Image (cartoon, rainbow, N blue to C red):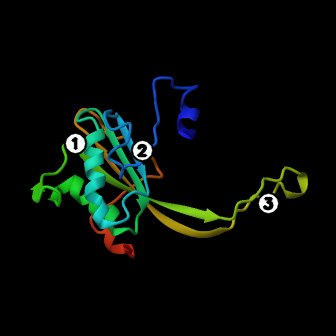
């Protein structure tokens, strides 16, 4: 709802809708989308197939974009990337599926976390704009563009994951 409220005044042709993707009775199940964005949805291995089924249902076969944002240390985020980019076993159908048509990339970022600080605008604190970083969290963004759509250009802040990058990250569930 918040995303829709932000988008509507500027781009009236764009609609944002929240989907409980594990609920097959959702009212939006008849629609397809140009862009599917998921955050923190690839966390358990046994939920990857229902997630893939939902994405496949909603994502238009051409000129559409998928973005799945999650922690880079989650093995299931990388498994999802492998299934989409290389193909994999479909437990529901008990068969091997081919890779998805289009282009799939994994981008890596380091999210710096710090304590929330209220900006002070008095002269006494003007020169002291340092933020103390409490920690860094590795974030992975899986992007898939279906045929007919190019992935967005990389910026100086984007890092395209290489095959050996996952070996450098201490994985969790």
At which x and y percent is residue 10? 56, 26
Q: How many marks?
A: 3
Query: Where is mark 1, residue-wise?
Result: 102
Point out the image quarter for the C terminus. bottom left
Element type at mark 2:
loop
Q: Is any part of residue 153 visible from this angle? A: no
Q: Height in image: 60 above or below 106?
A: above
Residue in the foreground of this view, choosing between 79 and 134: 79
Alpha carbons under labels 3 and 2: distance apart:
43 Å
The residue that appears at 29% across and 59% down in the rendered structure is: 48
Alpha carbons under labels 2 and 1: distance apart:
24 Å
Query: Where is mark 3, residue-wise?
Result: 128
Residue in the foreground of this view, choosing between 144 and 50: 50
Alpha carbons under labels 3 and 1: distance apart:
48 Å
| Residue, far top | 12
At which x and y percent is residue 155? 44, 46
Query: Where is mark 2, residue-wise?
Result: 19
Point out the image quarter for the N terminus. top right
The residue that appears at 37% across and 36% down in the rendered structure is: 28
- Packing grade of label 3 (10 A; few <14, some 14-19, many >=20) is few
The residue that appears at 53% across and 34% down in the rendered structure is: 4
């Amino acid at each position: 709802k918040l995303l829709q409220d932000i988008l509507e005044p500027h781009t009236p042709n764009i609609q944002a809708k929240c989907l409980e993707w594990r609920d097959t009775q959702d009212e939006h199940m008849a629609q397809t989308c140009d862009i599917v964005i998921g955050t923190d949805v690839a966390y358990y291995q046994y939920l990857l197939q229902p997630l893939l089924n939902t994405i496949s249902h909603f994502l238009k076969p051409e000129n559409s974009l998928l973005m799945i944002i999650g922690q880079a240390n989650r093995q299931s985020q990388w498994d999802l990337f492998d299934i989409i980019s290389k193909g994999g076993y479909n437990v529901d159908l008990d068969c091997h599926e081919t890779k998805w048509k289009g282009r799939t990339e994994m981008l890596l970022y380091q999210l710096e976390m710090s304590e929330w600080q209220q900006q002070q605008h008095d002269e006494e604190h003007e020169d002291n704009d340092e933020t103390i970083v409490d920690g860094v969290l590795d974030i992975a963004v899986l992007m898939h563009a279906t045929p007919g759509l190019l992935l967005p250009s990389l910026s100086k802040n984007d890092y395209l994951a290489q095959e050996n990058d996952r070996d450098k990250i201490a994985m969790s569930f």
